[in-house]
Image: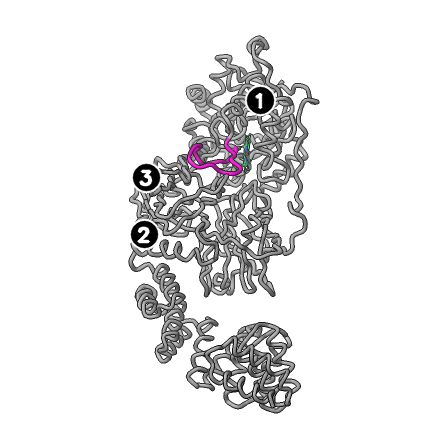
Amino acid sequence: MKAAFPVTAIALPLAAVLGLSVAPGPKKVHAAQAAVTWSHNVAPIVYKNCTACHHVGGSGPFSLLTYRDAQRWGTMMQQVTTSRYMPPWLPEPGHGDFQDNRRLSAADIATIKAWVAAGMPQGDAADAPKAPVYTSEWQLGPPDLILSVASPTQVPASGPDVFENFVLPANLSSTKWIRAMEIKPGSPQVVHHANVILDRTAALRRAHPADWQRGIPGMDITVDSGQNFDPDSHFLFWKPDSTALVEPDTMPWRLDPGNDLILNMHLKPTGRVEQIQARIGLYFASKPATQFPMLLQLEHDSTLDIPAGDAHFVVEDSLTLPEAVDVLAVYPHAHYLGRRMEGFAKLPGGETKWLVLVPDWDIERQAIYRLSKPLPLPKGTVLHMRYTYDNSAGNPRNPHTPAVRVRGGNNSTDEMGHLWLQVLPTENAGKDARMPLEKAWMSNRLRKDPSDPTALFNLASMDTEAGEYTEAGKLYTQALATKPNDPRVLTGLGTAQSLSGDTAAAQASFQAAVTADPNYADARFDLAKINLQRNNLAAAEAQFQTIVQLNPNDFAAQDGLGSAQLAQGKSDVAAATFDAVLKADPANFDALYNRGQIAAAASDLATAEADMVRALAVHPDADAERTLAIILASQNRFAAALPHMQAAARLAPADEETKRLLGRLQAELQR
Amino acid sequence: MLPLTAKIASIASGASRCIPWLLMPIRPAGLLLLLSALGHAQTIPADKLGAPASPSLLLYFVASDCPVSNRYFPEMERLSSRFSVPTLYIYPNTYETLAESKLHQSSFGASPADARTDPSGDLVRSTGARTTPEAVLLTRQGTAWHVAYRGRIDDRYIHIGLERGHVEHHDLEAALTAVSAGRLAPPPSGPAVGCAIMGAK
């Protein structure tokens, strides 16, 4: 019989001396109780709550699948379940109702304890449930797309935890909707958690041209979300017992050509040098999303300035919902000084609903918590977060001894306080239902920090979208005060100026953006476009040419180049440019339309007709319809021309020229 | 527990010939262990441990499947080499084989030759080790080994699941420093945290 030693060396002699029941107890002590056995009582608990991680190849350090395993780890199982270290689960019960709640019941903990006290008997092996089987295969079968980190990374044997960001270009040729994702972190015992972030503009890759393949250090990162209103919508999170992350049918997430996935990993040294190389498997949905959730954030990082020794530093934030939403999931996040995290909602009627309560935060066990069922919150609900930090020597997780003043930031020695919520607007279903939420969120940020460039930028972009160009211009200009020469802000400002008709100011803004970042293709594209618009044709051609040289697959720039060439009367060169585009992208509308125009001007009516027909197959367009009608009419094919001219008139009812041509065509047909 | 360690340590340091091992030649010899917990001596045959005849010997009780124990390998290696003390890694759990222990040693950067198992449970019994990882520092006194220090390596772990951001007490290092200077090893400042030993009875 094995002795059941307690884990601390100090406790044993005392226990041994006192003859406590840690040693296999005499039978009579337990005779009164029904015998607790592995097979009958403990195996079901362990299989349900432990072996998803504790199996060979899993994230747990050892397997708990057999009686022998359990017997070897029995005393520790009792210890870690009593302390609630295992299974890892931070939320306090009764403060939010979550899926996959891993918290053990008091009865289960008592069973494990009684079993250990009874000397860990096996009982009748035939009585035991069948052990679950785990495989290292992809859980949902072969993925539609597998992305791998470029090269293996070494995690040192010891030292502080490592936080690394890996860029995985998706290299898609068309947009895909992702219904499920599985992350295979490589070596599960090294990886504490991982987060996938969508980098719509490949911003991180562009910011680290030399080292993005190796991994970029940092606990948290911020990336640009692109040109359109496109808020983050999904928690793409891996923790040690995650299998595949399956989204609801109506809510796949979008992945576009040019997007990167960023795998943000928390790696823990194991005692030996480990190599990891993560893979991500993606499963495509057959249909696009019809419901569009959004991630909302509460934070007050600008007040995160925790004096050394302060054991009770509080950070709070609140946000009033401008419309009704369902809360789908919550993600509380802090670094090592975070202690207690409260998230709750105050409904307009005065009722308070808990979103989450973490009484003893531990970053090592952080997770996303998905609600068992969506929590509806009416318009006017106030979301609250209240986090408490302990920057004293009394916080054992404090990375600094002696304690030092700690401020907000992305590094593990900085602090952070975020409460993320995944919400789904319930009043109207479209993507833009999220706009009021974004606006409320950003306005809230601005209230906390009137010079917050992210808030100013996003609010300005929303104003631009709403056609309020003057207001947008003001906000962009304000953002420039904090981020002078920021190419994104300058480009936004240029766009607002250009849309308000001030092309000269727009040109200056785009030019400033290009000067600030010569590789920023969006700014250069806008500059080229405005040059084209202002008839600075040679300049436009040169700008487009530069973009194309940097990225030959930038077809929009190729089309711009052809247009600039065409406008200068260089139709042969322009035609060659469009030919090149069409070779790579046969359904490129602009190239087809322009090549058709060139052919028509050269009286090559067969080519012109074919190109216009192809262009119209890509998408309806008034100009293309009208051009096609003219091409047909000039061959006296009036009957064939008529429906195209009618279509043109339908698509552009205000166009006088089309009306006039339609009248002439009808007259011609009556003759 | 604390007074017990201190008493044994004081026996060890009571010997006037406590020479720093740094200067001592290393050669194999018969080895006696003093049973620490109950205070009666027990002989361990030399071929069993194959330990050197230096004035001191460091034993690390480890387990290949214990994550805390594994995380200590770099620190254990650092201490052994800093003090040039002959070191053995004892794999006391009965399910560990010597061959596997040697493999484990090499993958964690320790010498395979320093691996030992404890199939009879003698080492666990005579040193009083309970946990992996746990360090036992032995000093030679005549033909017997005395336990000069037994306990945690440092205070990185407060309990299972709670790890300090910063190690504050390097207990074993303090013991090694003291003993190498001919002083009494201070007892550990807190319990060893790790995995219970499932040794032979």
Question: Can you identify the residue that label 2 sits on?
Answer: A302
In the rendered image, which quarter is residue B13 located in? top left
The answer for which chain carries disc 3 is: A
Which range of residues does the magenta coloring cover? A87-103
**Left or right, residue A162 beside residue A592:** left
Residue type pointed to by label 1: Leu
Vertical position of residue A452 compared to residue B15: above or below? below
Residue A604's place in the image compared with A372, above or below, is below
User: Which residue is depicted at the point 31% across and 48% down?
Assistant: A305
Marked residue chain, label 2: A
Q: Which chain carries label 1?
A: B
Q: Residues within 10 Å of mark 1 (few under 14, many from 20)?
A: some
Most foreground residue, A149 or A477 = A477
In what quadrant of the picture does the C terminus of chain A appear? bottom right
Give the numbered dot on residue A350. Answer: 3
Residue hosting label 1: B32
| Rendered location of residue A171, percent (x, y) | 59, 63
